[in-house]
Image (cartoon, helix red, strand yellow):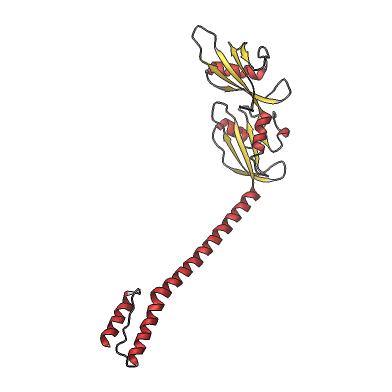
């Protein structure tokens, strides 16, 4: 059901395997031992540093303490997470030109898209913004910089909240943002022009209906009166009140 989970195990007292989906014996991996110590001391979820499993594949191990009776040894649930699978999921979601980086709390790459092979397992502490985001535990202001591939990007570095810690760093090409902004402005101007044209059409229709037509009817009636047809009745309904009053005066005069 969870393709990113490579294996599950329950340890007793941080050493003895209680049960496992894969019989691998006692846990001796240094990264897993560190996560076990962290989980045991804090009595809460812990995530191991980047590691390479027995098959040579990158992975993380999540450790969760399991509550037990006071007289029994503590137990821990271990879940080995497939970083290759996780990186593939990011690959399907990252637009062309955008770079997404996720580093653990020690500043080691655990996700990098595109081209994860360039960086997974390597330290990113020397990259601009990464160390500061980890130390300050606060999002860093977006900054513009030229990256190693020569592309100028806007970069934002956001620390991950506990339990795992770490930082997410995203770089978006300035050209992409500018292009999108230009497109947005073009759409806005086009919409504004359409609104102006529509307003003009509505105003013209309103003037035609409310002003021009009543004046034309009034003028025709006045010409009939002038020609001697005193039965002519000047009607200026549906128009401004001033035209209605003027039509009434002409009727009274006739």
Residue 227 sits above or below residue 8 on the image: below
Is residue 26 at least partly visible in the picture?
Answer: yes
Q: Is 149 displayed left or right of 221 in the figure?
A: right
Residue 43 in the image: x percent, y percent? 52, 17
The residue lying at 55 percent from left, 15 percent from top is: 40
112 or 155, which is in the foreground?
112
Q: Is residue 125 visible?
A: no
User: Residue at image x 49%, y 9%?
Assistant: 70
Q: Is residue 77 above or below residue 222?
A: above
- Residue lying furthest left: 252
Give the side of residue 67 with respect to residue 24, left or right: left
In the rendered image, the residue lying farthest to the top is: 71
Q: Is residue 162 above or below residue 235?
A: above
Q: Which residue lies at the image location 62% right of the left edge and 49% below the top edge?
A: 177
In the image, residue 20 lies at what x, y percent?
A: 63, 15
Where is residue 183 shown, x and y percent of the image?
60, 55
Residue at image position (41%, 74%) is 209
In the picture, which quadrant includes the N terminus? top right
The quadrant holding residue 101 is top right
In the image, 221 versus 175, the foreground residue is: 221
Quadrant of the image occupied by residue 182 = bottom right
């Amino acid at each position: 059901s969870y393709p990113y989970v490579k294996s599950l195990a329950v340890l007793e007292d941080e050493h003895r395997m209680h049960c496992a989906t894969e019989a691998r014996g006692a846990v001796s991996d240094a990264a897993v031992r560190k996560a076990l110590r962290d989980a045991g001391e804090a009595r809460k979820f812990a995530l191991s540093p980047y590691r390479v499993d027995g098959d040579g594949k990158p992975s993380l191990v999540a450790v969760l303490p399991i509550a037990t009776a006071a007289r029994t040894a503590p137990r821990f649930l271990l879940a080995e997470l497939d970083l290759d699978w996780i990186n593939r999921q990011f690959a399907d979601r990252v637009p062309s030109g955008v770079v997404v980086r996720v580093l653990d709390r020690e500043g080691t790459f655990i996700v990098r898209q595109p081209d994860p092979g360039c960086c997974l397992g390597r330290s990113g502490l020397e990259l601009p913004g990464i160390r500061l985001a980890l130390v300050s535990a606060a999002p860093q202001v977006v900054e513009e910089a030229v990256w190693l591939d020569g592309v100028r990007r806007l970069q934002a570095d956001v620390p991950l909240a506990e339990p795992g810690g770490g930082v997410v760093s995203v770089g978006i090409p300035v050209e992409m943002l500018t292009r999108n902004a230009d497109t947005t402005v073009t759409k806005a101007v086009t919409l504004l022009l359409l609104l102006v044209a529509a307003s003009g059409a509505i105003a013209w229709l309103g003037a035609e209906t409310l002003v021009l037509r009543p004046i034309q009817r009034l003028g025709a009636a006045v010409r009939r009166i002038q020609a001697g047809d005193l039965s002519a009745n000047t009607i200026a309904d549906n128009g401004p009140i001033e035209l209605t009053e003027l039509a009434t005066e002409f009727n009274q005069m006739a």
